[in-house]
Amino acid sequence: LKHRPSRRAPETVGNSLPTFFSYSKSRRMGASIRAANAARVILSCAVLAVARFEYEVSPDFCESLQLLQFRAESFSASSNEAAEALQTCSPLNNHGAYFSVKVEVGTPMDDQPPQTFDVVADTGSDALIVPSCLCAKEGKCDGEDACFQGTGRSSTFFLATGEVPVLSMEFGSGAIEAAVATDTVHIDGLHANMSGSLLLMVDRQLDITGKFEGILGLGQIQSEHAKPMGKQLARRWRREEEEEGEPNIKGFLREAGVNRFSICFNSHTNGALRFNTPAPSGPQLGSVGSYHWGLELKGMAVGGAEEPLLFCGEGEECGAIPDSGTTVILGPEQKIMTLFQALCDQWPRCVEKAKEAISLASKDVEDDERAETEMNIKVESFQRLLYYCDDWVHEGKGIAELPPLHMKLAGAKTGAGPLLQLNVEPARQKNREVVDVKIDARSYIITTEPDQAFLTTALLGGVAPTHHLPSATSSQRVCLPAFGVSDYYASSSSKQVWIVGTPLFFSNVVNYDLGSTPPSMSISNERCDVCTKKASLLSDGVVLDTPADGTSPANDENVLPRFMRGAPRIGHFDLSGF
C-alpha cells in the first residue's frame, strides 16, 4: 500500500468516490470479478497484516473489506433469486420515433432523490449506457438531459483510480464514447449490480433530435469468449497493453438474471416491456444471428397470408433482424419498389389513381419498358396518395383501407445444440418452421407535419417520389411509409438482410428467450396491453405483469396512423455473425 485513501474524490467520469485500493487495472473488473473477490480479500488482508506495522492502516480495515464483499455477493444472489420469482411490467414511453423506459442508477445518499434516466429500449444492442455529468460539463452532451454523478450521490458507485477504460461505439446516428464503471441499476422491481458493466457516456456525436438519456440494450447476451459487439460495430478499447483481452461487458439482462422478456408498442399510448414472462405458447424461432436477434426471411406478401410471395422465396435467401431501436423497416431498394407496387395493386384507391397515368404513359412507351413504367407510376401514386392522406383518411376505414403485410419468418430449432447461422447448408434450413407475421397499415404508415416529411423520405433514396411533393398546408398532416433503403448483406454470402424496426412491435407482441439454445423469439399478433401497477405478493412495491382493463387504448383512433415528429432513428449493424 503506497498511498493512503484520498479524502477528496478525483475529478473523473463519475466524480468517483475515494477507493481504498485498486484491483490492478480497472479492466480486470470484468466477468470474473465476483469469483475473484474472496481471493483478493484474503490476499489484501495478508498484505495488511504486514503493512500495518509500517503504514497508518486501521486494524478493522480487513473486516471492512470482507463486509463489502459479503454485501456485494448477497446483493447479487438476492437479485438473481428475486429475478426468478418476479414478473414485472415497465411502461415504454412513446416518443414517436422510439420508445424509452425509466431506469434508476445508483443508491441515493443523504436523502437525495434517485437518479433516473429515460433510456431507449433497444433490442439491437447489448449494453446499458447513461450520460456522465462530465459529458455535459465539457460541452459534449446536452445540458438539458439528465446525467449521472457518482460522488456524493450513490453509495454503491465504483470507478477505478488510474487509467479508466473508455470505449467507442458506433450507432446509425453517430458515435459515442463511454467509460466503464460499477453501480446498481433498478427497473421497477428488478435490481442488478452492474459490476464493471455500467457505461457512462463521456462524449456523443449523435445526429438525433430530442433528448438522449441513454440506452437499455436488450440484445443477445454475449458469451465470455465472444467479442463484445452487438450494435457496437466499432467498439475499440483504448489501452496501453494490447496483449490484454477485452473485458466482458455484461448487459442488464444478464446481471439481473432475466431469461425471458417481451416488448410491444401502441400507436397512441405507451408500450410495455415485461421481464420474466411465462414461456410463450407459440412457435419458438431460434435466433440465427451470433450478435443480433436474427431470423430467416422466407418471403413477404401483401393483402393475405396466402397471397404470392413478392421476393425472398424459393431459391433466394434473405435474413431479418427485428430491432426495436430502428424506427422503420429497411430493405434493398428494388425490393422496396416491388413492395410499394404491390401495396398499390391491393389498394383500390391507388389502383384508380394510377390507372389514368398508366394509360397516358403507355402511348409513348415501348413494350419492353412498359413493366418498369407501370411500376414507377404505381410507386409514385402510392406515396402521393399517402402524402395527402388528410384528404381521405377520415372516410370509411381510414388508414385500414391499405392492405396488411405478411412476413414469412423462420428460425433455428431450439434445444438442438450449437448456434446456427444464416450461412448453413440449405438442407438444414428446409427443416425450419415458417411463421406468418402480420404487420397492419397502422403500423407501417406514419403521420407527421409537412415540414418534417423530408426527414423520413430521405431514407427512401431512389424510391422516393421523383417529383417534388408540394407543401401541404400547415393545418394538415401528411402520411408516409415507414420504410427506408439499406444495403445489408450477410457476411461471406449474398443473403440480403432486412432490418425490421418498430412496425413489427406495433402489430405484435415479441417474446424473447435467452435461456433456450440458441436464444429464441416468439411473435404473436395480439393486442399490446399497457402496464398497470399493483402491490406484489412476493415483494413490496414490485410492478406486476397485470393486463389492462381489456380495452385497447387505440381502438378509437384506428382510422389514423401513428404520429411521429423528428428524424427516424436508425441502427448500425454488424453482420459478421450471419
Image (cartoon, helix red, strand yellow):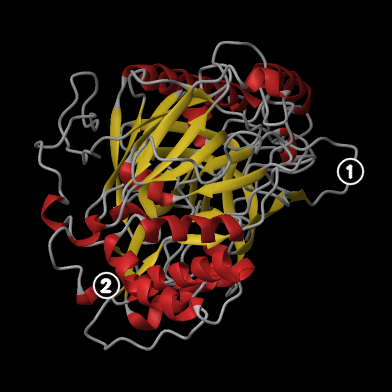
Query: In this orientation, which residue lies closer to the viewer: 374 or 427?
Result: 374
Query: In this orientation, which residue lies closer to the viewer: 365 or 457?
Result: 365
Callout 2: SS: helix
Disc 1 target residue: 241
What residue appears at the point 14 percent right and 37 percent down from the top-left corner? 548
In x, y percent, where is residue 26? Answer: 72, 40
Name the amino acid, label 2: Cys
Query: In this orientation, which residue lies closer to the viewer: 86 or 16?
Result: 86
In x, y percent, where is residue 290? Answer: 66, 32
In x, y percent, where is residue 222? Answer: 64, 30
The numbered dot on residue 225 is none
Query: In this orientation, which residue lies closer to the viewer: 65 or 401?
Result: 401
What residue appears at the point 49 percent right and 24 percent down from the top-left corner? 285
Name the amino acid, label 1: Glu
Query: Which tag is nearer the camera, tag 1 or tag 2?
Result: 2
Quarter of the picture containing the C terminus is top right
Quarter of the picture containing the N terminus is top right
Q: Are marks 1 and 2 in contact (CB under 8 Å)?
A: no
What residue appears at the point 27 percent right and 77 percent down from the top-left corner? 477
